[in-house]
Each structure stands twice: as structure tokens, then as C-alpha cells.
Image (cartoon, grey):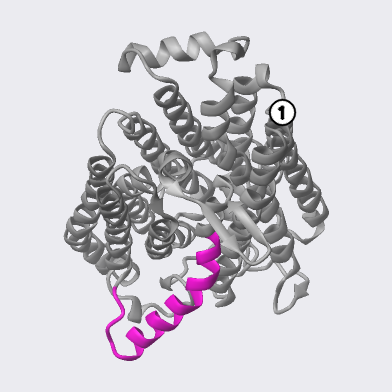
């Protein structure tokens, strides 16, 4: 059956309105009858709000983190930060002496990487020990505490640990709960993930404007406290949602292990293979909060003279462009894919993902051209605008497909674990993003952006190779299904 999902979207019974065409596998919630709200289970709107405010807190803090470290935390007078000496010594074992910018890039990369690794363990613990609800509540509490601790500079690294652990418990389980709101044959599930993704980007859009402005203009601690308040709102929304959520997946017992079927094993293998090229995608994509923020701060002309307002646009506001373009471009992509489908030209899932990686590479080629043309002067902000348009289209061709594929292909008893593996691929990519960021000061800017473009191009080539590797065994699986 897997070749229907990955290579021939027209043959799948259900149409994924935003993210492609995928047939859904059975999940153990067919007898769950939720309350309805605007044509969907009421729990969806509450999970939407929970995820929106959680992403508000995450992206609000992320928009500030690299600037906060470079401009304040890593300055010599702030050596009282707990764990600072240990962290610098740890990174310098591998990289040698690091500048403030390179050290900040390593910390940023490690943090953003670990928030994608811990969901692997959080998903497993939810599947085996605690259940999805308890894991989400525990994770939300940890993250709220961590964001508030960020307002106190000596506690920065301890706060980051709290955020990493909390995210690990929260992220894979709320994503899997969306799919469990619907019966296996419910065609609304595809649109539910589209709606849920809007929630993610709503929070991501608002947070740089609010947290970023407070942090840059009034004081770093105000921005971090705003992120903490957002996380507390997310916790309140989730607690309010409890009566409208499906029961947790029955916990697995270590004494009663039910072996996976051949179809389920092949589904797991397909997902693992798909995860590999996404590592290169994330290594390039996640420069947005790292070196792109530095490019915006140091190398972009942010001055505007517009009617009654003139001055420099805050650096963090540019971090809102990506989620803004998700809103603007998603309907256009829907229509484009529908047009392709009507004319028999819609690409399969893996082809779409390869297009996504290619567009990320193109986005960095655009910045390489901007850096080369500027000849050391500040580049126009329109280059950044074009960059964010292209990279956002690339994201829409790859990232939402991953969430939907995991929900679709993962065995019911492993859905949170496999969701954790998806985020674990981002872990490796973010480690790579942090390492690539150490070259920011070491090489000239055109060469740096060409380097990042080549990383995304490798992801494209791997996906194209993967299309030929997956087809033989997925066809075999189909014959045994």
C-alpha cells in the first residue's frame, strides 16, 4: 500500500486538501464521538489554541535568543551565568577558541536541536508509561517555568534545559492527539492538520512582533516574560480541553508486546528513510533564527520612511515574515496543486518534498547574490523579503507533509514514538545548523550562503534517490497487503 501514499497520490481514497493526497491507516478511536464545533470536533479548536500559544512562546524566545546572547549575555561583564564556562569549554574541545558569535551559534544550534531530539523520548514515555495527556501537561508546566527563568540572566542555561525537556514531553503528543480526534475513515482529518498548522504559524507570526519588540526595545526580560505568559495561556487552554479530547492510546505493557505486521514494519521503514534527507533541509532552513538574524542586524538596510513613521524596522520583526507568508501563500499553493491534479500533473509526495528542498537552496542563492552585489554595503531589505517568500514555499512543500505522513503511516501503537522520530531528524539538522553558523565570521558572506544552498541541494538529491529506493519494497508490501 505504501506506493499509493508516496508515489501515486491519485490512487489514495482521501484527498489531503493542503498537503497532498494520502490514505489514512486505522487508528484505535473509531468509536470516539466528540462534540462538534464549526464542522470539526470541539477538541480541535482547543488544541489549535494550545498549539498557537505554545508556538508563540517558542518562537518569541527563539527570535530573541541569538541577539540576546551576542548583544548581552556573552559580554565579559556577564560571566556570572551558571554553566557559562562549562559550555564554552565543551564546545571549544571540538571547535577550538570561539568568538562570541560562534559560541552563540553553537548554543543556539544545540538548543534548537535538543528541542527536536527530546520528543523522541517524550513520545516513547507517553506511549509506554504516562499517556499523552499527562505528558502534555507536564511539558507545558516545565516550559512555562523555563520561559520565565529566561528573564534572569544567571539562570539562562538552566532555563534552556527546562524548555528542552518540556518541549520533549509536549510536542509529539499534541501533534498525535489531533489525528486521534477523528475516526479512521473520517475525511476531515486532512483538513484538521491544515487547520492545526495555521495555529502553529499564527503563534509564530505574532511572537516576533510582541516578544521581539518588547525584548529589543524595552528590555530582554520583558520579551522572555511575554513568552512565559504565552505558555501559561497554552496550559490553561489544554486543561480546558480535557473533556473534549479522545482517551489516550492504551499504554503498552512490557510483558505483552504485540509484533508489528508486515505492513506496519514497512511503514516504519518508509518513514525512517524519509526522515534522512529532511536533516539537510532543517540544517539550511533553521539558519533563519541564527545567521539570518545576524545578516538582518548587520548587513541589511532596515530604515524606512513611511508617512508619519520613520526609523529602523526591529530585527525580530523579520522573523514574522515566514509565518505571514504561510498564511498568504498556502491558498495559492492549494489552488496550484488542485490545478495540477485536474490536469493529471500533481507530483507525488516525495517529488513535492524534493521541490521543497530545491526552493530552500534557491532562497540561499538569492542571498548569496545579494551579498555579492552589495560589495560590503548594507543590502536592501527587499532581498530578505524575496528570501522569505521562496523559503516559505519550500517549507510548505515539505514540512506539513512530514506531520501528515507520520499520522498516516505510523502504526497506531507507535504514533507518538514515530512523531518523535520526525522531530529527531530535526535535531540532527539543527546541530548541523549550529555548526554551519560558526562559519559566519570565518568566510565572506556570498560563500557562506552558497555553502548553505549546497546543503539544501544535497537534501534534494537524496529525496530523488529515495524515490527509486522506496518503490521496490513498497510494491512488495502492496502485494502482501
For the C terminus, the quadrant is bottom left
Residue 127 image point, x, y percent:
58, 42
For the N terminus, the quadrant is bottom left
**Nearer-the-camera pick, 135 or 198:** 198
**Nearer-the-camera pick, 270 or 402:** 402
Residue located 71% across and 53% down the image: 50
Q: Mark 1, residues whose alpha carbon is within 10 Å: few (<14), some, or many (≥20)?
A: many
Residue 463 image point, x, y percent:
24, 56
Q: Quadrant of residue 376?
A: top left
Residue 322 image point, x, y percent:
50, 58
Residue located 31% across and 61% down the image: 359
Q: Quadrant of residue 298?
A: top left
Residue located 68% across and 28% down the image: 150
Q: In this view, does 469 lie to the left or right of 310?
A: left
The residue under label 1 is: 151
Is residue 15 something that shows in the picture? no
Q: Give the range drawn in magenta.
A: 323-347
Q: Quadrant of residue 426?
A: top left
**Is 165 contained in the magenta span?**
no
Residue located 40% across and 84% down the image: 338
Dominant secondary structure of the residues highlighted in magenta in the image: helix
Residue 272 image point, x, y percent:
34, 48
Q: Is residue 410 left or right of residue 27?
A: left
Q: In this view, does 124 lie to the left or right of 292?
A: right
Q: Residue pushed farthest bottom?
A: 343
SS category of the residue bearing label 1: loop
Residue 101 against residue 264 in the figure, above or below: above
**Is 337 contained in the magenta span?**
yes
**Nearer-the-camera pick, 123 or 276:** 276
Amino acid at each position: 500500500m505504501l506506493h499509493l501514499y508516496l508515489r501515486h497520490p491519485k490512487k489514495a481514497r482521501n484527498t489531503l486538501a493542503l498537503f497532498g493526497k494520502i490514505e489514512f491507516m486505522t487508528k484505535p478511536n473509531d468509536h470516539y464521538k466528540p462534540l462538534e464545533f464549526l464542522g470539526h470536533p470541539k477538541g480541535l479548536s482547543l488544541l489549535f489554541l494550545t498549539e498557537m500559544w505554545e508556538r508563540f512562546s517558542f518562537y518569541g524566545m527563539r527570535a530573541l535568543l541569538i541577539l540576546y546572547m551576542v548583544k548581552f549575555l556573552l559580554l565579559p561583564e556577564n560571566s556570572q551565568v551558571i554553566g557559562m564556562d562549562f559550555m564554552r569549554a565543551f564546545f571549544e574541545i571540538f571547535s577550538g577558541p570561539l568568538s562570541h558569535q560562534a559560541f552563540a551559534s553553537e548554543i543556539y544550534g544545540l538548543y534548537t536541536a535538543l528541542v527536536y531530539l527530546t520528543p523522541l523520548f517524550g513520545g516513547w514515555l507517553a506511549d509506554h508509561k504516562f499517556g499523552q495527556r499527562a505528558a502534555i501537561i507536564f511539558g507545558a508546566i516545565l516550559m512555562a517555568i523555563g520561559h520565565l527563568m529566561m528573564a534572569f540572566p544567571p539562570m539562562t542555561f538552566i532555563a534552556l534545559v527546562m524548555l528542552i525537556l518540556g518541549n520533549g514531553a509536549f510536542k509529539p503528543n499534541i501533534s498525535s492527539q489531533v489525528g486521534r480526534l477523528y475516526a479512521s475513515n473520517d475525511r476531515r482529518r486532512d483538513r484538521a492538520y491544515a487547520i492545526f498548522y495555521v495555529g502553529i504559524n499564527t503563534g509564530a507570526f505574532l511572537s516576533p512582533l510582541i516578544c521581539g519588540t518588547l525584548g529589543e526595545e524595552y528590555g530582554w526580560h520583558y520579551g522572555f516574560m511575554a513568552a512565559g505568559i504565552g505558555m501559561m495561556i497554552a496550559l490553561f487552554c489544554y486543561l480546558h480541553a480535557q473533556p473534549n479530547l479522545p482517551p489516550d492510546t492504551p499504554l503498552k505493557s512490557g510483558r505483552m508486546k504485540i509484533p508489528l505486521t508486515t505492513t506496519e514494519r514497512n511503514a516504519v521503514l518508509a518513514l525512517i528513510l524519509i526522515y534522512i534527507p529532511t536533516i539537510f533541509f532543517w540544517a539550511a532552513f533553521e539558519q533563519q533564527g541564527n545567521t539570518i538574524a545576524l545578516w538582518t542586524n548587520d548587513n541589511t538596510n532596515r530604515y524606512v520612511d513611511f508617512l508619519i513613521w520613520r526609523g529602523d524596522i526591529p530585527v525580530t520583526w523579520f522573523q514574522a515574515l515566514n509565518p505571514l507568508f504561510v498564511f498568504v501563500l498556502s491558498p495559492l499553493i492549494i489552488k496550484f496543486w488542485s490545478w495540477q491534479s485536474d490536469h493529471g500533473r500533481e507530483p507525488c509526495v516525495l517529488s513535492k518534498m524534493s521541490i521543497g528542498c530545491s526552493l530552500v537552496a534557491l532562497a540561499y542563492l538569492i542571498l548569496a547574490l545579494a551579498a555579492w552585489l552589495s560589495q560590503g554595503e548594507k543590502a536592501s531589505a527587499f532581498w530578505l523579503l524575496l528570501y522569505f517568500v521562496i523559503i516559505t514555499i519550500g517549507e510548505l512543500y515539505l514540512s506539513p507533509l512530514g506531520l501528515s505522513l507520520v499520522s498516516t503511516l505510523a502504526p497506531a501503537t507507535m504514533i507518538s514514538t514515530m512523531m518523535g522520530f520526525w522531530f529527531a531528524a530535526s535535531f540532527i539538522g539543527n546541530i548541523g545548523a549550529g555548526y554551519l553558523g560558526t562559519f559566519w565570521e570565518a568566510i565572506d558572506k556570498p560563500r557562506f550562503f552558497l555553502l548553505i544552498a549546497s546543503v539544501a541541494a544535497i537534501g534534494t538529491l537524496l529525496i530523488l534517490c529515495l524515490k527509486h529506493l522506496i518503490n521496490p519494497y513498497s510494491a512488495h508490501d502492496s502485494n502482501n497487503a
